[in-house]
Image (tube, rainbow, N blue to C red):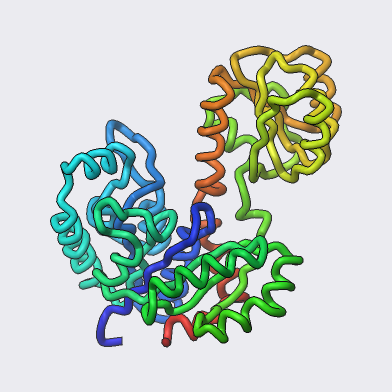
């Protein structure tokens, strides 16, 4: 390549593995003898550290790809709620922001012959500053890899709509974290249908347990909870259910859950007991600073269901916990390594890189 090949990795929704895929593609590029760079123009995975709001994803890319650029260049826009409110109030100039992003990109691209650019949590994020992922693709002259989940056939509507918006810039679609039964249906009819509509499908990455959700220990640490019953197995939490109903209906509901944590008041012993009877409940999160009864703790220990106690109310706890799970399992080099192997095995990287 004589010029920088830019791939914008976008997703239809949050928590589709976009970051791990983008960084893993950078690693795959380096294995091909190319110099790979990374950029995330709109920082959305935000955490306050020493008075600054930082995004965790560029730091992971710096570590894996050996990048030496500063964080402000890798992530020129911190797309926080405060920033968005200011933009809505007219305190941000979209033209100036676009120029800032373009200059940062050109600085990074000068050192690499392939750039992996990570889009927002969804393709329309950034509209208030006229910098959606569609705008980014145009601004950076990028080809687009669209990362999508697949739960049922209705998801193909979203893929088609996104493909139409990106037009000729769409290099292909990668379905990620697809369950085995869904993969069979997608393989049989979905791919041929999309290809018939000129939407290239580059691969289907199966769901991998080590990349899904967060462990109980990670969750407890992130939400500031105390482990009253320690986990005995390395189960992951992928979803939450609020125990705010009566015990009979609660039990029926809980039995439909898989890899879930039930969030309920520490004084709701009947809900806690119902949750412990459901095989798909992996954890209890008890709110309000209430300590559960000895009987509940004993039953949880016997059922090997860890119990986390927090002082926050149920709504605040659920918001914090869902934010942790949306970020996925703690992102580190091992995560990228596993995603890299999955991409090599299940995605046509030659078609992506050489198109």
Considering only vertical position in the picture, is 11 above or below 167?
Answer: above
Report if residue 316 is visible in the image. Answer: yes
Report if residue 350 is visible in the image. Answer: no
- Could you say where residue 30 lies in the image, as x and y percent from the top left? 41, 74
**Residue at (83% x, 40% y) in the render:** 279
**Pick the front one: 162 or 81:** 162
Image label count: 0
User: Which image quarter: residue 257?
Assistant: top right
User: Looking at the figure, which quarter contains the C terminus?
Assistant: bottom left
- Could you say where residue 276 lies in the image, as x and y percent from the top left? 81, 29
Q: Is residue 305 left or right of residue 312?
A: right
User: Looking at the figure, which quarter contains the N terminus?
Assistant: bottom left
**Residue at (64% x, 45% y) in the render:** 238
**Pick the front one: 85 or 220:** 85
Considering only vertical position in the picture, is 157 above or below 45?
Answer: below
**Residue at (51% x, 74% y) in the render:** 173
User: Which image quarter: residue 133?
Assistant: bottom left
Q: Is residue 216 left or right of residue 255?
A: left
- Could you say where residue 161 lies in the image, as x and y percent from the top left? 47, 69
Considering only vertical position in the picture, is 329 above or below 8?
Answer: above
Q: Is residue 43 left or right of residue 184?
A: left
**Residue at (62% x, 79% y) in the render:** 191
User: Which image quarter: residue 292?
Assistant: top right
């Amino acid at each position: 390549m004589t010029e920088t090949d830019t791939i914008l990795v976008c997703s239809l929704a949050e928590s589709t593995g976009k970051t791990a895929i983008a960084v893993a593609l950078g690693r795959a590029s380096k294995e091909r003898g190319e110099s790979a760079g990374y950029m995330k123009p709109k920082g959305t995975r935000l955490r306050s550290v020493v008075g600054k709001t930082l995004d965790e994803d560029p730091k992971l890319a710096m570590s894996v790809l050996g990048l030496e650029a500063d964080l402000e260049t890798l992530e020129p826009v911190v797309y926080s709620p405060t920033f968005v409110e200011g933009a809505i109030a007219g305190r941000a100039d979209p033209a100036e922001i676009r120029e800032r992003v373009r200059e940062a990109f050109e600085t990074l691209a000068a050192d690499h012959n392939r750039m992996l650019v990570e889009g927002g949590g969804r393709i329309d994020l950034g509209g208030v500053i006229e910098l959606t992922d569609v705008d980014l693709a145009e601004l950076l002259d990028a080809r687009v890899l669209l990362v999508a989940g697949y739960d049922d056939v209705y998801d193909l509507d979203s893929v088609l709509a996104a493909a139409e918006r990106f037009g000729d810039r769409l290099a292909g679609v990668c379905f990620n974290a697809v369950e085995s039964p869904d993969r069979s249906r997608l393989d049989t009819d979905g791919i041929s249908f999309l290809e018939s509509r000129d939407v290239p499908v580059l691969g289907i990455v199966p769901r991998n347990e080590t990349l899904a959700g967060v462990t109980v220990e990670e969750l407890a640490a992130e939400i500031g909870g105390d482990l009253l019953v320690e986990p005995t197995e390395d189960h992951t939490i992928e979803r939450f259910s609020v125990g705010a109903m009566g015990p009979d209906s609660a039990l029926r509901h809980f039995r439909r859950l898989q890899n879930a944590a039930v969030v309920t008041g520490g004084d709701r012993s009947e809900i806690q007991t119902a949750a412990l009877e459901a095989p798909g409940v992996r954890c209890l999160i008890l709110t309000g600073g209430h300590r559960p009864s000895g009987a509940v703790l004993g039953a949880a220990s016997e059922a090997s269901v860890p119990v986390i106690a927090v002082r926050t109310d149920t709504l605040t706890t659920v918001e914090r916990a869902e934010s942790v799970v949306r970020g996925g399992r703690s992102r580190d080099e091992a995560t990228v390594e596993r995603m890299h192997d999955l991409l090599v095995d299940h995605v046509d990287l030659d078609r992506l890189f050489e198109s």
